[in-house]
Amino acid sequence: MKENQDLNIIQFTQDLRVPATISKEEAWQRLEKNISNLSEKPNTQTRFPIYTFISLSIAASILLFIFYFALKQAPTKTFFFETQSSEVKKEILPDSSIIFLNANSTATFTYNKFRKKREVSLSGDAFFNVRKGKEFSVLFGGGQVNVLGTAFYVSAYSDRFISIECTEGKVRFEIDNQKVTLNAGEGIKSFDHILSEKFTVNEKDVKEKLNGVFFWQKISLAEIEELIENRLGYNVILETTLATRNFSGELLLTSPQSFLPTLAAAMNLDYTINDKEKTITLNAK
Amino acid sequence: MEGTKKGTDWFKTIFDEYYDYIRNYLFYLAGDIEIAEDLAQDVFMKLWENRDKVNESTLKPFLFKIAKNLFLNLHKRKKLNLEFVNSRLENIENESPQFVLEVKEFDEKLQRALSNLPEQCRTYFLLNRIDDMKYQDIAKSFGVSVKAVEKQISKAIKLLREQFDQKL
């Protein structure tokens, strides 16, 4: 990026586009209406009888009423992004913030609202790099994250297992009426509505999640089970006694075959995969 | 088309030709698209009201002049925060997240640097780079010499380069 900066400045400027809240056609229609209003100036000398005035008032009220409801129900453009298993998508928001949507996830926002209030709804895993500016919120089942300009990772496939990892700036995390502030290099998770202690995260590990590589200092098998089910769409059958056992290390979560040998060896487990029925069974050896 | 012949057809042609330039110019001045779009409406309303007095050959300078005056009358100078849409970022395909984030970082630095430029060199530079207005066209539209435009655009590039060197 640095070897030919002058060239980049010019090339980049040519790639910039001025945003718009209305199209050129809409701007023309607005203008055309204003022109016609200008040429239809009312004759101020005309006097209306009182009953005409009352009738006009009633008509105006009805029109106002209709206009209010029409406006209330005016279509607002909603953007819906979606990824399949083992797919990562990059999406640019109207303020140039970026979302990297990880596997099996969805993100939505409403364009008209977004320009006034930066808000995105998420179900799944995503890395956000937010442009500095007004508050930016990510809403998910059971909670939300509020930031100004920063980079962070949200894992929120369901309200059972939520994880937030901050790599730049500061984020405020709200869940179950509890508020936590995370600084760069800090993460926190909530499993079954129990909030963990803050843990340390490093930027490289967080970004590796977009390649399917997940690293944990400590995670229970129940939490891994939840992640696998949501991320890969497999039903995991796990012995209850195994649920609280903790795993530490790295797993490649792109398919059952990519991580089960490692997980089974590390935790001394037996496993079976049924691709047809989309089930994984884990038992103690 | 002169005098009373300037009806809505004439006005629509002028609107189609100049709306984007005027709206974009107002955005470069105000840094706020809603203000730019509202003022662009006012500019064209002024044109409509004065259509019989306006000379076709000076139409473009007339529109830029009204735009500047309306902006100065209504909005006090404040720190600018231009927020462009970057089509390059939108069009990146099959690249690593790391690369995309590097491009985004560069884009943010550039937009911040553009916002920090003095008004005249910022608007001339952006009209030239984004709206493809030639130096002669800018000179004619703002009633200045081509040399003056060249100077302002060189100044813009120099200041941008300096801001990048200072690690924005």
Image (cartoon, coloured by chain):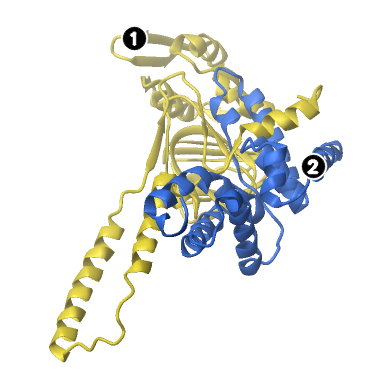
Left or right placement of residue A38 versus residue A180 in this view: left
Would you identify the image quadrant in which residue B66 lies?
A: bottom right
In percent of width and height, residue A54 lies at 17, 85
Q: Is residue A70 above or below residue A95?
A: below
Question: Circle 1 sits on which residue?
Answer: A275
Left or right placement of residue A213 versus residue B149 in this view: left
Chain coloured yellow in the rendered structure: A
Which color was chain B given? blue
Amino acid residing under circle 2: Ala
Q: Which mark is residue B47?
A: none
Q: Quadrant of the N terminus of chain A?
A: top right
Would you identify the image quadrant in which residue A153 lies?
A: top right
Is A174 or A237 nearer to us in this picture? A174
Determine the chain carrying the residue at label 1.
A
In percent of width and height, residue A70 lies at 26, 59
Amino acid residing under circle 1: Asp
In percent of width and height, residue B124 lies at 71, 45
Asked whether residue B149 is in view, the answer is yes
Left or right placement of residue A11 versus residue B40 in this view: right
Q: Residue at x 57, y 52 (%)?
A: B59
Q: Are marks 2 and 1 in contact (CB under 8 Å)?
A: no
Question: Circle 2 sits on which residue?
Answer: B156
Kind of element beneath mark 1: loop
Determine the chain carrying the residue at label 2.
B
Would you identify the image quadrant in which residue A202 lies?
A: top right
Is B79 or A125 nearer to us in this picture? B79
Q: How many marks?
A: 2
Q: Residue at x 60, y 19 (%)?
A: B95
Of circles 2 and 1, the one toward us is 2
Estimate how packed mark 1 is, as few (under 14), some (14 to 19) or many (20 or more) residues with alpha carbons within 10 Å. few
Q: Residue at x 71, y 39 (%)?
A: B136
Is B57 or A71 nearer to us in this picture? B57
